[in-house]
């Protein structure tokens, strides 16, 4: 926000509104306008800029000190006319307002210093109104609200209405993708962050990093440089706020999709499968310690996985269990929701390192190797489905954006035409599994019944808030998770969390769904060395309220003397159509 303008000229002794002629007769002084000193070359420099006003919208403000002028950006198209008014509703009775309009903004980002339009008292009482403001061309205009003498105090309500033509944001051609200058700035921002010595590749969400770099603040210098050099007039007429609404989402989507197109669908490390992988859904996990716990196919997969270590001569499952750490093999059934393919991951420990392989469902030929916890030889990349999206425009291959909400305005790309399968809707349980190769999962296990449904209806959502839990119940720790891309209502809800606290029994937890309904979280709060880890805790949330949106885990410390930290928590949710 720029500093509030200060007038350079002194005031007459007879006051700001009534002046004195040479004969002592009172005269009407003109309304006080924003002042432009020698170093002021633009109207925007002389007002407090408070963002945009929508073409059919309103903004409210309050004058709290002398010489305040509030500026709002209004975007219109060619041939448009607008009506601007300070309304009786929402405006202080004693306020005497003024309205100025400057613009349109030029390629250098300036609105000029000569007002295109002005009004003092055409509205109700001493309020201002421009009933039909014919604008010379499409672009961004600066609407300035002031008070007649510069000393008014109180609230006001400014409304805008489009009277003719189209007043929405100027159309910007984005079919060719993100403007080259903005895309280069976005890529440089990401590269600089990754090159930072403090960047933690193991624990960083690369897609979130791209989203941060596609925000208005880091992109503003590139946009300003583009417009100062006489760049695209329509783009520059939008202003940074307009660009952030219409263009930067395209840049973000393009950058994310470019990254996903070349990214192994399983991630970079074995740990990525179970934390922060948007494309792959973990259908099941189990640990085997004897050959008898394996099918013939799983035994062959284990042998192939162990051969990826230094034990190339292993021929049998018995021999494999003899050489792997603690005699344990971890088997996971995976569904690549982006390509609609099923896989099996077999991971073992060898010398305290992680080794193994990922196999296509039903095959014992490794497709990807796990070497020291890292995937090698991966040629399976993220497909068109299950990518994050804010609108259908960000989806491709016939998919549409699904599972958004008011509080979480993004979902996942999905093609519903591909969901139909004969086994969908059949009964299932822990012993009667759904055919994973058909992309089906058992929905309803936690509530005592199960029906096979599309695997994409399950999602795991994680947060690592590292949130301090206030002592003695004086306050509470609220941590939120954004849930998106599911159907409409939850069926199964499982909670995982980690808390460090010297006296975990002092804590009371609850979970609040996006509809605002809160349920208690009942779990054993006895920890080893002050750390409590709870996994796969079934939480009885209402099954008829929305699933997509913000979920909140609340922790309250009921007793004084000790404090703790909510380190991380996760929700595993399966959903259905309401």
Image (cartoon, rainbow, N blue to C red):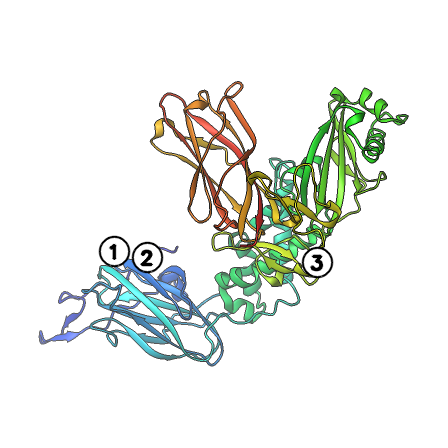
Disc 3 crowd rating (10 Å Cα; few below 14, some 14-19, many 20+) is few
| Marker disc for residue 38 | none
Q: Are the residues flagged by discs 1 and 2 in contact, CB closer than 8 Å?
A: yes
Disc 2 crowd rating (10 Å Cα; few below 14, some 14-19, many 20+) is some
Does dot 3 land on a helix, a strand or a loop? Answer: helix
| Marker disc for residue 418 | 3
Q: Are the residues flagged by discs 1 and 3 in contact, CB closer than 8 Å?
A: no
Q: Which residue is mark 1?
A: 65
**Residue for point 24% across, 71% down:** 127
Does dot 2 land on a helix, a strand or a loop? Answer: loop
For this view, does 26 lie left or right of residue 490? Answer: left
Where residue 455 appears, as percent x and y from the top left, is: 66, 48
**165 versus 560 height, above or below:** below
| Marker disc for residue 4 | 2
In primary-sequence order, the first of circles 1 and 3 is 1
In primary-sequence order, the first of circles 1 and 2 is 2
Task: State which mark lies toward you, 1 or 3.
Answer: 3
Disc 1 crowd rating (10 Å Cα; few below 14, some 14-19, many 20+) is few
**Quadrant where the image shows the N terminus:** bottom left
Where residue 44 appears, as percent x and y from the top left, is: 40, 63
**Residue for point 33% across, 71% down:** 100
For this view, does 382 lie left or right of residue 171? Answer: right
Task: State which mark lies toward you, 1 or 2.
Answer: 1
Does dot 1 land on a helix, a strand or a loop? Answer: loop
Where residue 232 appears, as percent x and y from the top left, is: 58, 69
What is the distance, in whole Å, between disc 3 and disc 2 at their CAs? 58 Å
**502 versus 567 height, above or below:** above
Task: State which mark lies toward you, 3 or 2.
Answer: 3
For this view, does 40 lie left or right of residue 198? Answer: left
Quick one: 297 or 39, which is closer to the camera? Answer: 297
For this view, does 328 lie left or right of residue 17? Answer: right
């Amino acid at each position: 926000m720029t500093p509030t303008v200060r007038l350079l000229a002194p005031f007459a002794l007879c006051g700001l509104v009534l002046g004195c002629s040479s004969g002592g007769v009172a005269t009407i002084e003109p309304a006080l306008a924003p002042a432009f000193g020698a170093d002021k070359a633009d109207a925007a420099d002389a007002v407090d800029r408070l963002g945009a006003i929508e073409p059919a919208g309103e903004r409210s403000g309050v004058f709290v000190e002398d010489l305040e002028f509030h500026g709002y950006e209004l975007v219109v198209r060619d041939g448009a006319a607008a009506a601007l008014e300070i309304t009786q509703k929402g405006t202080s009775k004693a306020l005497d307002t003024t309205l100025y309009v400057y613009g349109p903004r030029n390629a250098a980002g300036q609105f000029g210093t000569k007002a295109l339009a002005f009004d003092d008292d055409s509205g109700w009482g001493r309020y201002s109104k421009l009933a039909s403001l014919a604008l010379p061309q499409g672009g961004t205009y600066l609407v300035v609200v002031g008070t007649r003498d510069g000393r008014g105090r109180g609230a006001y309500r400014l409304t805008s209405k489009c009277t003719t033509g189209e007043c929405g944001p100027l159309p910007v051609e984005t079919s060719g993708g993100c403007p080259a200058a903005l895309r280069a700035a976005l890529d440089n921002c990401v590269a600089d962050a990754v090159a930072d010595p403090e960047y933690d590749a193991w624990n960083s969400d690369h897609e979130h990093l791209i989203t941060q770099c596609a925000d208005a603040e880091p992109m503003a210098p590139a946009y300003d440089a583009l417009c100062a050099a006489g760049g695209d007039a329509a783009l520059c007429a939008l202003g940074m706020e307009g660009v952030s609404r219409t263009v930067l989402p395209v840049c973000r989507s393009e950058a994310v999709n470019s990254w996903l197109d070349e990214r192994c669908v399983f991630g970079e490390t074995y740990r990525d499968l179970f934390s922060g992988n948007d494309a792959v859904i973990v259908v099941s996990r189990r640990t085997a310690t004897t050959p008898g716990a394996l099918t013939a196919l799983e035994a062959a997969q284990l042998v192939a996985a162990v051969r990826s270590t230094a034990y190339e001569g292993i021929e049998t499952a018995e021999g494999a269990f003899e050489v792997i750490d603690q005699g344990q093999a971890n088997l996971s059934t995976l569904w690549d929701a982006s390509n609609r393919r099923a896989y099996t991951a077999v991971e073992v420990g060898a010398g305290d390192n992680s080794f193994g392989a990922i196999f296509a469902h039903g095959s014992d030929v490794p497709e990807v190797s796990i070497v020291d916890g890292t995937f090698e030889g991966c040629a399976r990349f993220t497909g068109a489905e299950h990518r994050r999206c804010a609108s259908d425009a960000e989806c491709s291959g016939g998919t549409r954006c699904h599972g958004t909400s008011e509080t979480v305005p993004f979902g996942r790309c999905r093609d519903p035409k591909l969901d139909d399968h004969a086994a969908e809707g059949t009964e299932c349980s822990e012993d009667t599994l759904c055919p994973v190769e058909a992309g089906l999962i058992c929905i309803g296990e936690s509530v005592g019944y199960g029906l096979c449904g599309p695997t994409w209806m399950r999602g795991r959502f994680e947060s690592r808030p590292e949130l301090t839990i206030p002592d003695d119940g004086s306050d509470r720790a609220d941590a939120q998770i954004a849930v998106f891309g599911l159907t409409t209502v939850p069926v199964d809800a499982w909670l995982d969390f980690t808390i460090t606290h010297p006296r975990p029994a002092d804590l009371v937890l609850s979970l609040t769904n996006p509809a605002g309904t809160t349920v208690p979280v009942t779990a054993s709060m006895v920890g080893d060395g002050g750390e409590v880890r709870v996994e796969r805790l079934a939480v009885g949330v209402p099954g008829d309220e929305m699933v997509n949106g913000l979920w909140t885990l609340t922790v309250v410390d009921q007793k004084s003397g000790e404090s703790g930290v909510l380190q991380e928590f996760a929700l595993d949710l399966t959903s259905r159509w309401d």
